[in-house]
Amino acid sequence: MEVVILAAGKGTRMNSSQPKVLHSIGGKAMLSHVLATARELDPAAIHVVIGYGAEAIQAHYPNSGINWVLQEQQLGTGHAVQQTIPHIDQDQDDNIVLVLFGDVPLISPATLQSLLNETGQENVSVLSVISTAPEGFGRIVRDDSAAVQSIVEHKDASAGQRLINEVNTGIMAIPAARLGDWLQRIGNSNKQQEYYLTDIIALAVADGLEVKAIQADNELEVMGVNDKAQLALLERHYQMQQTKQLLEAGVTLRDPARVDIRGELLCGQDVEIDINVIFEGKVKLGNGVSIGANCVISNTSIGDESVILPGCHIDETEIGCAASIGPVARLRPGTKLADGVKIGNFVETKKAVIGPGSKANHLAYIGDADIGSACNIGAGTIFCNYDGANKHKTVLGDNVFVGSNSVLIAPVNLADNSFVAAGSAINTDVAADSLAVARAKQRNIPGWKRPVKGQG
Ligand code: UD1
Ligand code: CA
């Protein structure tokens, strides 16, 4: 079996400069969904027909093993498939060509497998669906004994044919040995002056082959995307499929309609997720993890029993067990938090490795830092990691206390049990068990007269 994916069309109604098949569902290009599904069927080759935005599409899939086939002018679906014929093995008697559309993203491997199971050398199989809104689609024309005779495009259909509500999804399985011949025989004398792939159906019937129309049972699974409204509809459907699986696996979702999974989310037991949470890329949540409202979490793992309070933004971070993050914390790439770490409100971390039980409870920037266990980073502490040209590192041993509103000017080391007085600017290493005070000495001026308004 070889797969042909049609993706050359412009998608005019998307009103976008981006090729249609690169628009995403669940954070992944529509074409990527179709490719992933195709690969599950283990085809001998995958040919993707591209035209509009060909370079952008190819650039999206480096080293993918895809056979790209250029269709310079989009003269119809039949013409598109014809471009792949020189690349398809037609000598192998039992080779089947499975035609998919790059803009039908939610088709499942199971549905395609059932279509392939019905396809042999002596028949063509078409995936159809009973449509609640058949307008615009090709109709499946059957004879009195319900045998498929042809597919007629909406624009070419008679008034009687337009009453048919069984429509062509576009997905077909065709014996490779016959396909090239049929494609050579189709013409373009129709309303759209296009070479219709659907015209091979009548040719197959005329050649004495049986055509089976296998009905899909879910209209959304086989729905194509032509505009942003359909993209949004399928996005929601896809998200509801994902949240359904999570609910079945025992995850508590306060509202499944208000969680978006744009990638892969793995959850342990007794995970709770509040509303308006977005997961991107690969996210792993351990047992008993709780995610508060309004968080965006990307490519991150969170250990058992950790709590993420509302409003956090977490990217490329590893969080240990029983940690507490937020509310409103920002953990940037390269943050690694050990068990029991507390990161409070308005704290930003970047490339910060923080040891067990250490805390930064309020208002801090911790960048390029290596912090031991049981440290306390006071409110308003800034790790000055950047000198305007280069980044430098700050290292804290265990049990270090940094008083509020201090700046630690990297590179600098604060050894075990050292203590920084509040308001210090530290640019020299502090030895173990020492107190560092680095601030102007306070003077008190008795009887000082305050400035008076208007007397400058
Ligand atoms: C097609 C079917 C129609 C079916 C409908 C389902 C034909 C003639 N019609 O119609 O029976 O009900 O899909 O959505 O097949 N493409 C190319 N090159 C081209 C033309 C199209 O690669 O020259 C690609 C498009 O990018 C798209 C797919 O083929 O992914 C379908 O093309 P589209 O123009 O949307 O076909 P429809 O008119 O919707
Ligand atoms: Ca279409």
Image (cartoon, grey):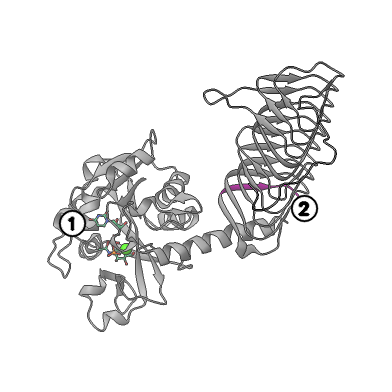
Disc 2 beta carbon < 8 A from ligand 1? no
Q: Which residue is mark 1?
A: 75
Q: Is 89 above or below relative to 112?
A: above
Q: Is residue 221 visible?
A: no
Q: Secondary structure at mark 1?
A: loop
Q: Amino acid at mark 2?
A: Asp
Q: Secondary structure at mark 2?
A: loop
Residue drawn where x is 47% and y is 49% of the image: 28
Residue 143 on image: x %, y %: 29, 76
Q: Amino acid at mark 1?
A: Leu
In front of the other: label 2 or label 1?
Answer: 2
The region drawn magenta spans 263-269
User: Between 355 and 119, which is closer to the camera in this rendering?
Assistant: 355
Residue 89 on image: x %, y %: 27, 40
Q: Quadrant of the N terminus?
A: top left
Q: Is residue 309 left or right of residue 207?
A: right
Q: Which residue is mark 2?
A: 270
Residue 130 on image: x %, y %: 41, 73
Label 2 to label 1: alpha-carbon separation? 54 Å
